[in-house]
Image (cartoon, helix red, strand yellow):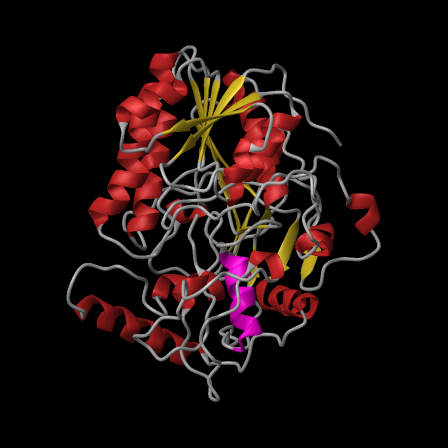
C-alpha cells in the first residue's frame, strides 16, 4: 500500500538527526516534499547533507529567532524533538518539552504554516499507581498526578499544542509507544539488546505475561504523515494512539530478538517484589547524591512499570480519522531489524540524537508485508483483529524501559566509554564485563523515553 499526501510542500522537521526524525525525513522525501531540518550546532548532519531536497537550518528549541528562520516558508511542521531521558530537573524538562514546543508553535503560526503535528507519548497519560490496562483509548483523561517530569511535560506540551489550533492552523498529536526498527542506535531496543549480549538483563517479568503495544518506526512515520494530510475538520485539536497491528508479549519478544542477535535471552528471573524494592532503593539513593542529577538511576519505578505493566492501546480512532493502516508487520520488522543498511549514499551511519533529545521516526517503507507474514507471526506477538484494534504498549512513545540489567544499585553502565560498535539494531557492546551473579541492572542505559 502506498500513501501519498494530497499536496506537496515544505516540511519542517525537528529531531531530524535522531532515529524517528531521520525516518520522517525519508518519508517526506518519498512523498515529494521538500524538507527543512532544524539541527543543533555540533550535531552529526552527514547523512542529512547527503540527501537531495533537504535544507539544514542551525537552531535550537530554546532559540526563538532560529525557530522563526526555520519555519519561514514551511507548510507543515513535524515536531519530534524532546528531552527523552529519565533524569533531570523539572526546569530542564519544562524548557525542552513545553517552552520549546510553545516557541515552535508561535514560529509556525507566524510563518503561515497550516499544519502542526506533535509527536507525543502514551506516557502523557501514565499514572503513578495503576495496574494492567488493556485497550486504552483516547477517552482516557490526563492523570492528576504524573509518574515523573517526562510524563508531566509531555502532557503539558500536548495540551498546549491541541489548544493552539484555529482557522488555517491545524494542530494534531500522535502517541506512538515503544518505537523500534532499523538505524536506531539509542532507543530502548538496541540498549536492551546490548544488555542481553552482555548477559546483564534479568527477566523482570516475575513470571507474569506482560502484554504491550509497540510501534515500528515505519508505522510511526506513516502515522505522522497521515496526520499531516488528514482533513483538518476531522483531526484538528485531537490526539491519537498509534501502534503496530500486533499485541506483543514483551518478554517473549525480547527472547526472540536475543535469538536473532545470537545471544542469550533475559535471565535469570527476578520476583516482582524484589524488583520493586530495588527500584525504590535506587531512586532514594540517587536523590541523596550530591550535585545536580546528571544520569539516570540504574533502576527506577518508572522503568520497572514500563517493563512489567501490561498496557495496550486501541488505535481505532487513528484508523478512522487518519486512515492509519500500519504498513509494517512485526514479523517483517524483525526480519530486517539487523539487516545491513543499503548503501544508498556515502554518508556515515545515521547518527544518534544529541543526548537527552528525541530521535526520529521510521523511514519506513510504505509497502504492506501482511501477505508475506500471514502464515507466520513474530514470536511473542499475536495479530489483532484489524489495524484499528488495540495494539501494543510497552515503551514510552518510543521509550522502552530498561536495558542493562545488572549493575549494583547506585552504579550505572559505562555507556559512552570508547567507540560505539554497531550491533543488533545499532546497539553498542557494553563497556563493562558481565558479572558472575545477577545484579540490579543499569536500566537507565536502555531507556530513552520518547
Residue 112 in the figure: left or right of residue 283:
right
Q: Which residues are magenta?
A: 188-199
Say which quarter of the image contains residue 88. bottom left
Residue 29 image position (x, y, % from top left): 61, 26
The tally of labels here is 0
- Dominant secondary structure of the residues highlighted in magenta in the image: helix
Residue 13 in the figure: left or right of residue 250:
left
Does residue 304 lie above or below 14 as drawn?
Answer: below
Extreme residue toward the left, this view: 290
Residue 346 image position (x, y, % from top left): 63, 40
Does residue 34 lie above or below 152 as drawn?
Answer: above
Whether residue 274 is visible: yes
Residue at point 58% right, 28% down?
Answer: 225
Name the one closer to the observer, 68 or 216. Answer: 68
Whether residue 318 is visible: no
Residue at point 50% right, 61% down?
Answer: 420
Residue 437 in the figure: left or right of residue 282:
right
Residue 320 image position (x, y, % from top left): 62, 30
Is 187 colored magenta in this rendering? Answer: no
Residue 252 in the figure: left or right of residue 287:
right
Residue at point 46% right, 62% down?
Answer: 446
Image quadrant in which the N terminus is located: top right
Does residue 262 lie above or below 334 as drawn?
Answer: below
Name the one closer to the observer, 204 or 196. Answer: 196
Residue at point 35% right, 66% down?
Answer: 301
Residue 120 image position (x, y, % from top left): 43, 39
Amino acid at each position: 500500500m502506498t500513501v501519498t499526501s494530497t499536496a506537496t510542500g515544505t516540511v519542517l522537521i525537528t529531531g531530524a538527526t535522531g532515529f524517528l526524525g531521520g525516518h520522517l525525513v525519508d518519508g517526506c522525501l518519498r512523498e515529494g516534499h521538500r524538507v527543512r531540518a532544524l539541527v543543533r550546532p555540533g550535531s552529526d548532519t552527514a547523512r542529512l547533507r547527503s540527501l537531495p531536497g533537504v535544507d539544514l537550518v542551525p537552531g535550537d528549541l530554546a532559540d526563538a529567532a532560529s525557530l522563526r528562520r526555520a519555519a519561514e516558508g514551511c507548510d507543515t511542521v513535524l515536531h519530534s524533538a524532546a528531552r527523552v531521558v529519565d533524569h533531570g530537573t523539572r526546569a530542564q524538562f519544562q524548557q525542552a518539552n513545553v517552552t520549546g514546543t510553545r516557541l515552535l508553535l508561535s514560529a509556525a503560526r507566524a510563518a503561515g504554516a497550516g499544519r502542526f503535528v506533535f509527536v507525543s507519548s502514551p506516557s502523557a497519560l501514565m499514572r503513578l499507581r495503576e495496574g494492567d490496562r488493556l485497550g486504552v483509548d483516547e477517552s482516557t483523561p490526563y492523570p492528576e498526578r504524573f509518574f515523573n517530569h517526562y510524563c508531566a511535560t509531555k502532557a503539558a506540551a500536548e495540551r498546549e499544542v491541541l489548544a493552539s489550533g484555529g482557522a488555517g492552523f491545524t494542530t494534531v498529536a500522535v502517541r506512538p509507544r515503544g518505537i523500534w526498527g532499523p538505524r536506531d542506535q539509542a532507543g530502548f531496543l538496541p540498549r536492551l539488546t546490548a544488555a542481553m549480549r552482555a548477559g546483564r538483563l534479568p527477566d523482570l517479568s516475575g513470571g507474569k505475561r506482560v502484554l504491550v503495544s509497540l510501534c515500528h518506526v515505519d508505522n510511526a512515520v506513516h502515522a505522522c504523515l497521515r496526520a499531516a494530510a488528514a482533513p483538518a475538520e476531522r483531526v484538528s485539536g485531537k490526539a491519537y494512539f498509534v501502534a503496530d497491528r500486533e499485541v506483543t508479549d514483551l518478554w517473549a519478544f525480547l527472547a526472540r530478538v536475543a535469538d536473532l542477535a545470537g545471544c542469550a535471552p533475559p535471565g535469570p528471573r527476578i520476583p516482582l517484589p524484589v524488583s520493586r524494592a530495588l527500584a525504590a532503593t535506587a531512586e532514594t539513593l540517587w536523590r541523596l547524591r550530591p550535585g545536580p542529577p546528571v544520569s539516570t538511576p540504574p533502576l527506577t519505578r518508572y522503568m520497572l512499570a514500563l517493563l512489567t505493566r501490561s498496557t495496550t492501546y486501541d488505535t481505532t480512532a487513528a484508523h478512522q480519522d487518519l486512515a492509519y493502516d500500519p504498513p509494517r508487520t512485526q514479523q517483517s520488522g524483525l526480519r530486517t531489524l539487523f539487516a545491513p543498511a543499503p548503501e544508498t549514499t556515502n554518508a556515515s551511519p545515521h547518527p544518534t540524537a544529541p543526548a537527552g533529545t528525541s530521535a526520529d521516526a521510521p523511514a519506513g517503507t510504505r509497502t504492506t508485508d501482511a501477505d508475506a507474514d500471514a502464515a507466520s507471526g513474530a514470536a511473542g506477538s499475536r495479530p489483532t483483529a484489524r489495524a484499528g484494534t488495540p495494539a501494543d504498549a510497552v515503551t514510552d512513545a518510543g521509550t522502552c524501559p530498561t536495558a542493562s540489567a545488572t549493575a549494583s544499585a547506585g552504579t550505572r553502565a559505562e555507556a559512552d566509554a570508547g567507540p560505539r560498535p554497531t550491533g543488533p539494531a545499532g546497539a553498542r557492546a557494553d563497556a563493562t564485563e558481565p558479572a558472575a551473579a545477577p545484579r540490579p541492572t543499569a536500566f537507565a542505559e536502555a531507556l530513552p523515553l520518547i
